[in-house]
Structures are given as C-alpha cells and as structure tokens.
C-alpha cells in the first residue's frame, strides 16, 4: 500500500514537473502570439505575460537594438520568445512579421496590435495633413492591415484572437491630443467591425483601453508633479497604472476562458471616466 502511494506520488510529481518546465497546462499553451511595439512599456508587459501563460511570442518594434534587448530580457526569464524588426507603418515589415512567425512557429493564433504614435500636441485646428496621415496610418490603418494579413493564418488554425490596444482617450478626449484621441475612437469602431466580420471564422476581436500607464509614451502626463496630481484627482484608484496592470486582461481575452467574448473593449484605467 505504502509503495503504491509512493509511486503514485512520484508519478504526480513528475507530471507536475513536466508541466512546469513546458507550457502544458497553461492557458495559452503552445499558442503563437504576435505583439507589435513590444520592446517596452505596455507591449513588453503583454509579451511577457502571454509567454508566461505558455505562448510562443514574437516581439517586435522599429529598432533592432530594442528588439535584441527585449528578447534577451524575456529569454533570461526562460520564456519562449524571439523577435524581429517590424515598423507597423511599412507594408514589407508587416508581411515579414507574418512570414517569420509561420517559419519559426508553424502558424499564428494571436495578434496584439499595440503600436501607436502621437507626434502632435495642440489645437486640432493646427494639425497638418502630415500629422493626420502619420497618426491614422500607424494607429488605425496599420492595425486594420495587420488584421487582413493575419486572418488567413488564423483560419488555417480554425480559430484566433485579436486584441487591439486603444485608450480611454478614445472615449474621453485628452486635452491637446485631438488627432490621437480620434484615432483611438476609430480603434473602438474597428474592433466592433472586425468582430462582426470575423466571428463566423471563429476569430474573436477585442480591445484594451488603458488609462494613464507609466511609460515613456505617457511621460508628459506624469513627469511634472502638478499635472500628475491633477490627473490623480480624476481617478478612483489613486495611482498611475503600470504596464503589468494591462497584461493579465489581454492574456485572458486571448485564452479559451474568453471563448464567448468578442467585440468588447475592456477599460484598465483606475476608474477614470470612460464612456462614448
Ligand atoms: N502609456 C499610457 O498611458 C497609454 C494609455 C493609453 C493607451 N496607450 C497605448 O498603449 C500602446 C503602447 O504605449 P506605451 O505607453 O506602452 O508606449 P512605450 O512604452 O513608449 O513603448 C512604445 C513601443 O512602441 C514601439 N514603436 C513605436 N513606434 C512603432 C512603430 N511605428 N512600429 C512598431 N513599433 C513601434 C517602440 O519601440 P521602437 O522605438 O523600437 O519602435 C516601443 O517598443 C499605444 O498604443 C498607446 O497609444 C498607452
């Protein structure tokens, strides 16, 4: 009897050890995920979490040095991550992202479209055509075009999950950021439109709308103490968010636990006002 218990214990332990050293048993086990703009900030936190939850993750951004640094950091944590340069505004880079994912991992299950720019502060009436083109190209058009490219790969797998990173600015405009705010509102619409079109293909499309998260991108809002204090007054949770506040929800949206959720936007903003 004692020997039987001992060997059952050994068996259970070896299964557990196997599961913890591979991705088996984790919510995104063996899924292949592309995360754009993932060499720092929110994208890096999302890439880390998807990999911790079992996915093979392809990180990317515009600069090779940033890609190398992010990949080294995540690989040092024993995560299944590799990387490549992808400027989401360049058609050839978007195509290469897909090709490399398929070459390295055999297919694609998850796309997190996270890249955005904001080259302009001021009255919307002063925004030039160049400003509008840049913001709409990177923040909106590139996301739609990445979806076009990834869908056939997800169809081959029989399912897929796309998460678009928008912003609470899409609901409640931030002052002096008109074109950026408009681009983020467009992403709320893109999410719903893609969700409608792709549901028959078993591909879900959801959206993350972060509030103020402490990153390089948002530094104009927290570097100065007075601006930070004014922003904290608008929040229910009295702290500025950190990138990891955004990552668990994305992993959940990509997992089988969210199989009946599509077309939704989840606000992660410490209770900041968010309504369209
Ligand atoms: N932080 C916030 O408070 C906040 C709030 C709401 C929404 N968001 C949204 O969250 C997303 C990420 O922002 P973040 O705050 O995490 O920014 P971040 O920390 O400044 O990181 C920006 C990342 O984007 C990459 N990148 C920039 N332009 C790119 C392009 N054209 N193609 C590919 N990669 C590009 C950068 O790497 P390279 O320089 O190497 O390209 C870097 O990895 C954005 O969509 C932003 O609008 C942020």
Image (tube, rainbow, N blue to C red):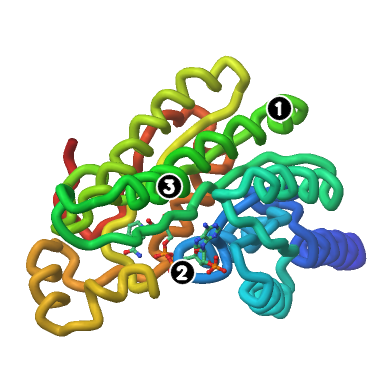
- Residue 142 versus residue 133: which sits nearer the camera? 133
Mark 3 highlights which residue? 139
Looking at the image, which residue is at 19% across and 66% down? Answer: 237
Q: Quadrant of ligand 1?
A: bottom left
Q: Secondary structure at mark 1?
A: helix
Around disc 2, counting alpha carbons within 10 Å, would you say few (fewer than 14), some (14 to 19), or many (20 or more)?
A: some
In the picture provided, is 122 more to the left or to the right than 65?
left
Residue 53 position, x and y percent, is 63, 57
For the residue with label 3, is its CB less than 8 Å from the closest atom of ligand 1? yes
For the residue with label 2, is its CB less than 8 Å from the closest atom of ligand 1? yes
Tell which tag, 1 or 3, sits nearer the viewer. Answer: 3
In the picture provided, is 15 more to the left or to the right than 262?
right
Residue 33 position, x and y percent, is 66, 49
Q: Secondary structure at mark 2?
A: helix
Around disc 3, counting alpha carbons within 10 Å, would you say few (fewer than 14), some (14 to 19), or many (20 or more)?
A: many
Of the image marks 2 and 3, the number of the one nearer the N terminus: 2
Q: In whole angstroms, how far apart are the C-alphas of marks 2 and 3?
A: 16 Å
Mark 2 highlights which residue? 41
Give the position of the N terminus as an image quadrant.
Answer: bottom right
Q: In whole angstroms, how far apart are the C-alphas of marks 1 and 3?
A: 22 Å
Mark 1 highlights which residue? 152
Give the position of the C terminus as an image quadrant.
Answer: top left
In the picture provided, is 102 more to the left or to the right than 49?
right
């Amino acid at each position: 009897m004692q020997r039987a218990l001992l060997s059952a214990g050994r068996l259970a332990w070896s299964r557990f050890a196997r599961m913890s050293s591979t991705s088996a048993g984790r919510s995104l086990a063996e899924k292949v995920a592309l995360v754009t703009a993932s060499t720092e900030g929110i994208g890096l936190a999302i890439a880390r979490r998807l990999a911790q939850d079992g996915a093979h993750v392809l990180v990317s951004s515009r600069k090779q040095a940033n890609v190398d640094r992010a990949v080294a950091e995540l690989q040092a944590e024993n995560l299944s991550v590799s990387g490549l340069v992808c400027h989401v505004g360049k058609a050839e880079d978007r195509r290469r992202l897909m090709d490399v994912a398929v070459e390295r991992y055999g297919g694609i299950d998850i796309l997190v479209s996270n890249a955005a720019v904001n080259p302009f502060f001021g009255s919307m009436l002063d925004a030039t055509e160049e400003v509008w083109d840049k913001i709409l190209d990177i923040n909106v058009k590139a996301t739609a075009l990445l979806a076009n490219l990834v869908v056939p790969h997800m169809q081959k797998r029989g399912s897929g999950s796309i998460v678009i990173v928008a912003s609470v600015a899409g609901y409640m405009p931030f002052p002096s950021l008109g074109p950026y705010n408009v681009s983020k509102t467009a992403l709320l619409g893109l999410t719903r439109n893609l969700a409608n079109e792709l549901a028959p293909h078993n591909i879900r499309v959801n959206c993350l709308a972060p509030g103020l998260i402490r990153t390089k991108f948002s530094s104009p809002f927290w570097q100065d103490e007075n601006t930070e204090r004014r922003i904290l007054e608008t929040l229910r949770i009295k702290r500025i968010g950190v990138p990891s506040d955004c990552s668990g929800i994305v992993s959940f949206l990509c997992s089988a636990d969210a199989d009946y959720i599509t077309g939704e936007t989840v606000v992660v903003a410490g209770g900041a006002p968010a309504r369209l």
